[in-house]
Amino acid sequence: MPTFVVEADGGSRGNPGPAGYGAVVLDAVTGETLAEAAEYIGVATNNVAEYKGLIAGLKAAKALDPAADVRVRMDSKLVVEQMSGRWKIKHPDMKPLAAEASRIYPTGQVRFEWIPREKNKHADRLANEAMDAGKKGKQWEPSASNAELGAGARHKSTRSAVAPAPDGPPGDAAAGAAKARAALAASYELTVGVPEQAAPPVGWGPADLGTPATFVLLRHGETLLTPEKRFSGSGGGDPELSAVGRRQADAVAAALAARGTIQAVVSSPLLRCRETAGAVATRLGLEVRVEEGLRETDFGAWEGLTFAEVRERYADDLGAWLASPDVAPTGGGESFNAVAARVAATRDALIARYAGRTVLVVTHVTPVKTLVRLALGAPPESLFRMELSAASLSAVAYYADGNASLRLLNDTSHLR
C-alpha cells in the first residue's frame, strides 16, 4: 500500500479578497511529484482557500490510489488542528468544507501535520500562480506553472539547503532561520527563475529576502507569587523579583550576552519586568525602553488569588472568563480580547521602529502567549494550551510581507 504526502495551501489578497489554492501529491518515499492542483476561486478568505486546497489535494491523492495512506502537511495551524479534532470548528463557512474533506478518505487513513510556511513552498507557489491567473481573468494551467522544483530534487537538494538551527543560547533561532530562508530563496530562483511580471508569492520570493524584525520574547523572572501560581497582573500590587528571579535574570543575561545579537531592549512598565530587562541591558550595554502596552492583564478582583481561590469565590465569573475572550475578570479587569488589541498595537509600533533588527521584549505570560497566538493565527483558546515558564525565551520573526514565523517557544535551557 503506497503512502502519499499531500501539501496544500491557500491564500487571499485582502482576506477576504481574490483567492486561490494550490496542492501537490508526493510519493512519500522518493519525494517525486505525482499530481498538482491549483485554482482561482474568486473572492474568499484565507481559511476558505486553505480548506479548498486541502480538499483538492485529497481528491488528487484518491484519484491515484483510494487505498493509500495519506499524510497531509500544511502551514495552516487552524486547518491542521480542526481536521485533527483538537480545535472546534465554529465558523459556518468552515464546517461544510471540513466535512467534505473528512469524507474523501475513510477515518484513520489520513494524518495531519503542521509545517512551517517555508517548508510548504510548492503548494504556496501554486496558490499564488492561481491568484495571478485569476487577476488576468484566467484559470491556472499546469503548463504555465513554475512551482515544481524538479522531479524528486525538490526534497533531496533544495530542502537540504536549509541550514540547521544555530547552536548557542536560545532566543536567536530566528536570525539563523532568516539566513537559511534567504539562502533557500536564492537557490529557488536559480533553479526555476521568477517571472518578472508575476506578483511575488505570499511569504516567498524577492520581497521576503529582507532581514525580519525579530522579537526575542522573555518572560520576567520569578516573584514570590510565581511559584504559588497566583494571579499577578497589572491591577494589583507590583511585586519585585525574588532571589530566584534575580538569579534567573542574571542567567538569561549571560546567555544572551554570549550570543551577542540583541540590538535593543524593551520592557513592560511593571517592576518585575524592568528588573529582568535591566539585568540583561546592563550586561549588553544597552538602555531599556519601557512600553506601556506590554503590561500584564488586569485581573481585577482576582489579583493575588490562586486559581482554586477564584473558583471558590467567583465560580460563575471564572467559568464565563474561560469560555469567552470577551469576558473580563471580576471587578473590571481586562478581557483577553482587550489585551490582544493593545498588544497587537504595541507589536505593530515595535515592528516599525525596529525593522530588520533583533529586539529583546521583556513582558509577561499573557502578552507573550498573545504574540505567539497572533503569529500562528490560532484562536484565543490556544492561550490555555501553552506552557510559559518564568525567565523563558520565545522568538517570533516578522517579515516585510506581513508574515510572522514562530521560531522558539518556552526555552529554559539557560536556567539549567
Image (cartoon, rainbow, N blue to C red):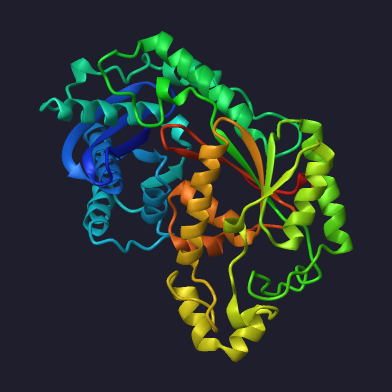
Q: Nearer the viewer, residue 250 or 414?
A: 250
At x 56%, y 88%, the residue is 314
Could you tell me residue 290's position as x and y percent?
67, 52
Question: Exactly how many numbered labels are in the figure?
Answer: 0
Q: Nearer the viewer, residue 350 or 416?
A: 350
Could you tell me residue 231's position as x and y percent?
66, 74
Q: Is residue 172 left or right of residue 5?
A: right
At x 22%, y 31%, the residue is 131
At x 33%, y 24%, the residue is 200
Above or below: residue 211 compared with residue 289: above
Q: Nearer the viewer, residue 289 or 135?
A: 289
Q: Nearer the viewer, residue 41 or 302?
A: 302
Say which quarter of the image contains residue 99: bottom left
Could you tell me residue 387's position as x and y percent?
63, 58
Say which quarter of the image contains residue 331: bottom right
Above or below: residue 312 compared with residue 352: below
Q: Is residue 250 left or right of residue 358?
A: right
Quarter of the picture containing the N terminus is: top left
Task: Identify the residue at the far left of this view.
Answer: 137
**Whether residue 108 can be seen here:** no
Above or below: residue 252 compared with residue 82: above
